[in-house]
Amino acid sequence: MMTKGKLFLSLLMVGAVVGSATAQRLKDAKAAMEAEQYDKAKEMLQTLVDKKPKDGENYFYLGQIYLINEKVDSAALIFGQGLTNAPKETLNQIGMGIVDLEKGNETAAEQKFVSATSDLKKKDYLPLYYIGRAYIDAPKPDYAKAIDYLTQAKAKNLKDPEILVGLGDAYSGIQGEASNAYVNYRDALNLDPNLVRAHVGQAIIQRRAQAYDVALENLSEKAKEYPSFGPIYRELAETQLELAKTLPDNTDEEKAKYESEIKKAVDYYKQYLQVTGDKSVEANVRYADFLVWGQQYEELKNVALQLANAPGVDAKVYRYLGLIAVNQDGDFEKGAEYFDKLFAEADTSRLIDIDYLFAGFANIQTGKADKGVPYLAKALEKNPEIMPEIGSAGMLAFQQGNYDVASAILSVPAKQKGTDYYYEANYVLGNASFRSGVAKKEAATAAAQGDSTSVTPVDTASYMPDFRNALKAFDVIIKSNDQKVYDEYLAGALYLTGYVNISLDNVNPETPELCKGLFVPAFTQLTQLLKDKQLQGKELTDAERGYLVDAYNYIGYYHVTKEDYASALASFEETVKVAPNDEFAKAYIEYLKS
């Protein structure tokens, strides 16, 4: 018969075996996370949580999976369960701080981190490590804080290579700290030569230095050495994509080369999915994110249509469908609807610059500029580097004759004083607004004249805002002291300002007495500008010669309406100096001399 003492010892041994097995499973789950086999890791961790609900560490790692899948609220719920079931486990308090970071509340996060680390034991380093990693992986990384916490973790444990990898990642994110990053990765490999993430980190240093070919070569070598480690293929995909995005795509040959390099990136990502074996909805959402980054809308359409039918799919599916509607199908109305759904269902902290960018384009294209323009401004606020996308879209709309669309889009960069696009955007904005105003004035005039039953006044409200916007935009050019602006845009801005004022004036041969000469100041300044250019020995362009002809003719016409015939004659004579065969000026000269 077993004595009580022997029974107690036997139970202890059983507990040790069970505990060891559980630890082994946690180790396996963490290894799956390391290999980015997130669906597998999630299943394992959920099992651990169900079997040992009082083990708080399991909740923390399960919450990490939800964070990776961008399910921040679900992660918070898991961390909260961990705190309830194992209140002494500080990792879940750190998890709640990471949730705050993900939501952009850095102050609340820091308070939780300080509280969680205020009474750590001598060798308790993991909380410090995971706070450091949180600051690296945050939507707005804080590498300095990451280094601070990771250095504290290192002081408590000199033998965990993961801390050194974290320090390498943090230093890699700081410009000018590549050598410190490399040293930490090297030291990590000295502790564990098979720590693949340290090898990958060294390649990322090269990628951040834009040495893409070198990074791709090194990553490819590591893929041969560790073919079953999926993250290498993801890094290959992302590096290949960054390389492709540096390539020009103006000529057919360049576009073919660009598409070839993009295809390599997509193929690497498919290989990543194959190696990790993750076929979950969440994995496909991450793949869709990659395709968004690479602007591969045809492939994105295939993935998004599958995701659209998945139960409980992430609200980001509306981003994908919206991008496809706008870029692939040209269905701006549908695109605007999808982005409306995205904004309604997704947490604001999860929205990115391109959400606002393409929501802006879609709404402007469908005539809702009052809604679209603020979206574009928000996109630019979130990412100033998106300016070329906005500027290019505005210029394209102008070239296609979509002047209202061009005006709305260009109104955003036209407000960004001090940027490279500021003056060009104002110049084209003024031109587009002027042309839009002319078209609306012609339509309003035709409508008024078409009413044969009564005298209908012209609806000036339909076009006056466009003319005012045009004058405001050109005024930015005219008042600039920038020599480059002076050389490139001033003559055109003065010329078009004159023409806007012609549209605002009463230039009608049947009622010459009503002409106010609103256009005279701009045209006079224009003629002086071009005279000065000629006096400097510079040749006028054909466009500038045309400007002079029109300016002198309109100034001459104005003097005729005011019966100042001497000034009128002088102005028309200036015209024929530039264009001897100008019929308008010649006819007036003959009339005035007679």
Image (spheres, grey):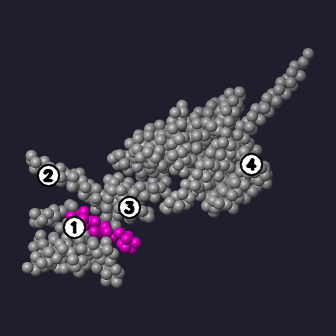
Q: Quadrant of residue 46?
A: top right
Q: Which residue has dot 2 on it?
A: 449
For image coordinates 59% across by 46% down, the residue present is: 110
The Cα–Cα distance between marks 2 and 1, rounded to whole angstroms, is 26 Å
Q: Which residue has dot 3 on it?
A: 425
Seen as rendered, the residue at the extreme right is 1
Tell me the crowding category of disc 2: few under 14, some 14 to 19, or many 20 or more residues within 10 angstroms, Cα based: some
Residue 119 visible from this viewpoint: no
Q: Which residue has dot 1 on it?
A: 519
For image coordinates 21% across by 75% down, the residue present is: 582
Is mark 4 in CB contact (under 8 Å) with mark 2? no
Sequence-first disc among 2 and 3: 3
Name which residue type carries label 4.
Tyr
Report whether 5 appears left or right of 579: right
Sequence-first disc among 2 and 1: 2
The boundaries of the magenta stretch are 481-502
Q: Is residue 256 magenta?
A: no
| Number of the label disc, if any, that sits on residue 121 | none
For image coordinates 12% across by 70% down, the residue present is: 561
Q: Which residue has dot 4 on it?
A: 226
Q: Is residue 243 above or below residue 5?
A: below
Q: Is residue 251 above or below residue 527?
A: above
The Cα–Cα distance between marks 4 and 1, rounded to whole angstroms, is 74 Å
